[in-house]
Amino acid sequence: MENEINENRIMEAAQQFATGFATMRELKGITSAEMEAVYSVGFNMYRTGRYDDAEKIFRFLVLFDHLEPKYWMGVGAIQQVRKDWQGAIASYGYASFLNMKDPKPQFHAAECFLALGDKQNAASALVALDKYCPPDTTPIGREYRAKAAKLRELIGEEAFAEIDKPDPEPAPAK
């Protein structure tokens, strides 16, 4: 009887997880408040330069709740500090996917692209920031639009001109 109950719970959990409707946090019964407490510890470790410890915490957080953008931002920040530009870009991309209206992932991805010398993709990230960022009437909108303007100067307008070009028409079929 006990094996049957465990097997049913395992199958139910696997189905929820496979369909994307559950996180490990939910399956393990970890509360949002508990996750927030762990995040606070990781954030403080990051702020004090304890990057190895902070990374472990942020990776735990994304493992247990892959749908929370700020956990991905934590992983991305560690990667960026360590100059793992590609890893940071991927983490910021996932955070951006989860919350398109947050300008931080797009801005930091642009910084990483610029560090790689990829002005075209840095410009694309800033164009996305401009498109989805809250307006100048909000504090975060003002802050990140101003930061983006400074970064845009470093990138140069040539990179942005390439983005604005229309796609060429496909060649006619023969």
Image (cartoon, helix red, strand yellow):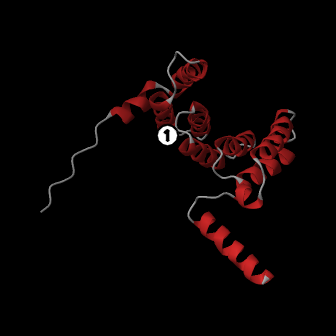
Identify the residue at horizontal 60%, vertical 19% (top origin): 143
Badge 1 marks a residue whose secondary structure is helix
Identify the residue at horizontal 55%, vertical 22% (top origin): 141
Identify the residue at horizontal 18%, vertical 53% (top origin): 171
On the rendered structure, is 165 left or right of 125? left
Q: Which residue sits furthest top? A: 137
149 above or below 29?
above
Residue 138 sits in which quadrant?
A: top right
Mark 1 is on which residue type?
A: Asn
**Residue topped by disc 1:** 121
Horizontal and vertical percent for residue 99? 56, 40
Q: Quadrant of the C terminus?
A: bottom left
147 above or below 17?
above
Q: Residues within 10 Å of mark 1 (few under 14, many from 20)?
A: some
Q: Which residue sits furthest front? A: 1
In this rendered view, identify the residue nearer to me: 40 or 86.
40
Horizontal and vertical percent for residue 19? 56, 64
Q: Quadrant of the N terminus?
A: bottom right
In this rendered view, identify the residue nearer to me: 78 or 62.
62
Residue 64 sits in which quadrant?
A: bottom right
